[in-house]
Amino acid sequence: MIFLTFFIGLIANFIGYIPPGNINLTLVQITINRGIKEAVRFIIAFSAVEFFFTYFIMHAARWLSGQLKLGTIIDWIMVVLFGVMGYITWIHRNKPPESNYSEHASIKYGILLGFLNPMQIPFWMVTGTYLITHEWILDGRVALVIFSLGSAAGSFLCLFIYAKFAKYIQEKFALSNKLINTSIAVLFFAFATYHVVKQIYLSFFKH
């Protein structure tokens, strides 16, 4: 049962990080601009925070699912987050990558984005409530700790594959840093636009 709980957490969060979002796009950018070593530092720091994030959200999943305006709040937070990250990436798209970074820079960035990760709230609200309601996992403290460890392992594994794939694509097709940064900035702006359009639709057109 312990192994199964860990494995379910790993698979659930691995799947959760497959779709492009602020975390894996930022990781791709770090991998391209700073190298795989800095990317791994980012992933380790982020995954460590993911353990605590998952544990807290799983405890509060049922309560959070009852908050009617939470989805709207999260959408507007994501608009700001994607917009800021897109703007920063865009204005630095022509800047050549630095050769030296503080060895703690990627770790601090991973910790920061681990806490600024609102997209995981609705994910665990739905996934967590489903898993507990259908008794795939128990909602006791020990079970949720094991599940959260699996969640951290799942995010680490998925993001590590993202980093290796990003490095492979860069080397295989000899893509320039400018092209990659521009593409990521456009994706950030596109995601911000999506959340704006979504809220406009929900507010004015959906009855």
Image (cartoon, rainbow, N blue to C red):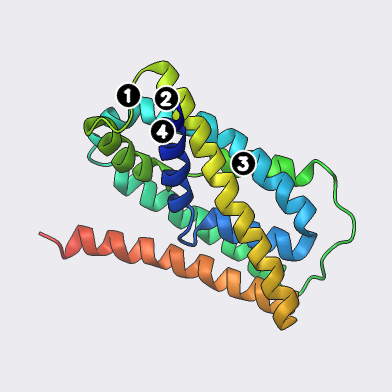
Q: Residues within 10 Å of mark 4 (few under 14, many from 20)?
A: some
Whether 63 is drawn above or below 79: the answer is above
Spatial CA distance of label 2 from label 4 is 12 Å
Instruction: Report the residue at 36% width, 62% height from top.
Output: 196
Instruction: Report the residue at 54% width, 45% height from top.
Output: 155
Mark 3: amino acid: Phe
For residue 192, what is the image quadrant?
Answer: bottom left
Identify residue for label 3: 46
Instruction: Report the residue at 77% width, 51% height from top.
Output: 38
Q: Residues within 10 Å of mark 2 (few under 14, many from 20)?
A: many
Determine whether, in the image, residue 59 is placed left or right of residue 100: left
Query: Residue 133 versus residue 71: which sits nearer the camera?
Result: 133
User: Mark 3–mark 1 contact, CB under 8 Å?
Assistant: no
User: Mark 1–mark 2 contact, CB under 8 Å?
Assistant: yes
Spatial CA distance of label 2 from label 3 is 19 Å
Identify residue for label 4: 4
Spatial CA distance of label 4 from label 1 is 11 Å
Identify residue for label 2: 144
